[in-house]
Image (cartoon, grey):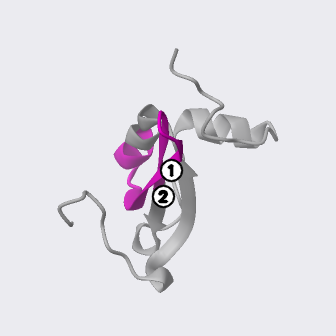
């Protein structure tokens, strides 16, 4: 793992990818076994900054595991975005 907390992983070793902005969602995915592959800072103005966490499921772990809240939304056919579970 690098100093930035990003784990290098080869594309052929990735079974699934996701991207999120909310840290609580990122933490749930990390706990399920996902790894952060990139952290991207987006700045649309001097006071407007957001961070995207790009995550991957390592192929050697088998079928991707999604945290229950994400999996439940997928099963109901609802489109998921990182904004779906606002922590406030």
> Which quadrant does the N terminus fall into?
bottom left
Gap between marks 1 and 2 measured at Cα: 13 Å
Q: Main secondary structure of the magenta part?
A: strand
Q: Position of residue 64 (x, y in %)?
A: 53, 59
Marks counted in the figure total 2
Dot 2 crowding, Cα within 10 Å, few <14, some 14–19, many 20+ = some
Question: Does the magenta segment cover residue 45?
Answer: yes
Q: Is residue 77 left or right of residue 23?
A: right
Left or right: 51 with respect to 79?
A: left
User: Is residue 29 a member of the stretch shown in magenta?
Assistant: yes
- Please state if 30 lies on the left or on the right of 43 as rendered: left
Instruction: Give the residues in magenta.
Output: 28-53
Location of mark 1 (residue): 42
Q: Please tell me which residue is depicted at 72% across the width and 43% down the height of the picture.
A: 74
Mark 1 falls on what kind of element?
strand
The residue most toward the top is 88
Position in image of residue 54 (x %, y %): 48, 58
Identify the residue position indicated by label 2 in the image.
54
Mark 1 or mark 2, whichever is nearer to me = 1
Local secondary structure at mark 2:
strand
Residue 3 in the image: state x and y as whole percent.
Answer: 17, 61
């Amino acid at each position: 793992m690098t100093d930035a907390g990003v784990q290098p992983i080869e594309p052929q070793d990735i079974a699934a990818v996701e991207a999120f902005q909310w840290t609580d969602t990122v933490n749930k995915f990390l706990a399920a076994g996902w790894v952060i592959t990139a952290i991207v800072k987006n700045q649309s103005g001097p006071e407007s900054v957001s961070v995207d966490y790009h995550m991957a499921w390592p192929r050697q772990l088998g079928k991707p595991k999604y945290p229950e809240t994400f999996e439940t939304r997928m099963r109901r056919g609802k489109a998921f975005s990182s904004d779906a579970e606002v922590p406030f």
